[in-house]
Image (cartoon, rainbow, N blue to C red):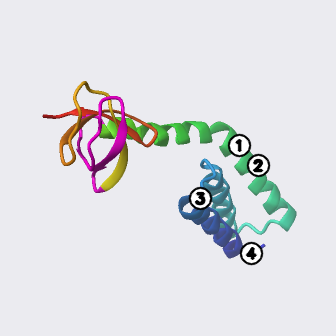
Amino acid sequence: MPWWGWIAVGALLLTAEMGVVDADFYLVFLGVSALLVGLVGLAGADFPVWAQWLLFAAVSVVSLVFFRRRVYGMLRRSARPLAENLVGEVAVARERIEPGATGAAQLRGTRWTARNDGPAPIEAGGRARVERAEGLTLHVRSDA
């Protein structure tokens, strides 16, 4: 395969991982491996096709085994969980929510399911402080 073919395949794999498919960062390393094989060809190395594929496979396996977990872990660690981002925020009840009941609340321009964990009802239009998030349900208390 010509050097530009490897670069095109690498670019497609990187684009697929970043924009279309969530493959848990596997396609990134395959894409980088294809780009490296393309760059080797661009530098003037004239390997037969089987050697190009062997180089691609070797770089892919080595990078996946030794680097994927570390790089993916560093990237995932930097993203805070949704619950941490919402705790302490103030939501507005869209309807009256009795203690222990669920209802609708507005937070950051989005409608959420809110569970009133407090002892007092939250009136429609009332403010409620988020104590925790469990999936797509906010656990709130009256902020009055």
- Are circles 4 and 2 on residues that touch, CB within 8 Å? no
Give the mark, 4 or 2, whose residue is nearer the N terminus: 4
Looking at numbered disc 2 in the image, what kind of residue is underneath it? Ala
Q: Is residue 115 visible?
A: yes
Label 2, label 3: how far apart the Cα atoms are: 20 Å
Nearer-the-camera pick, 77 or 100: 100
How many neighbours does mark 4 have within 10 angstroms: few (below 14), some (14-19), or many (20 or more)? Answer: some
Foreground label between 3 and 1: 3
Report which residue position mark 3 lands on.
Answer: 17
Residue 112 in picture, x, y percent from top left: 36, 48
Please, what secondary structure does the residue beneath circle 2 have?
helix
- Are circles 2 and 1 on residues that touch, CB within 8 Å? yes
Looking at numbered disc 4 in the image, what kind of residue is underneath it? Pro
Quadrant containing the N terminus is bottom right
Quadrant containing the C terminus is top left
Label 3, label 4: how far apart the Cα atoms are: 23 Å
- Are circles 4 and 1 on residues that touch, CB within 8 Å? no
Please, what secondary structure does the residue beneath circle 4 have?
loop
Report which residue position mark 4 lands on.
Answer: 2
Report which residue position mark 1 lands on.
Answer: 62
Q: Residue lying furthest top in this view? A: 119
Report which residue position mark 2 lands on.
Answer: 58
Looking at numbered disc 3 in the image, what kind of residue is underneath it? Glu
- Residue at horizontal 20 percent and vertical 33 percent from the top: 142
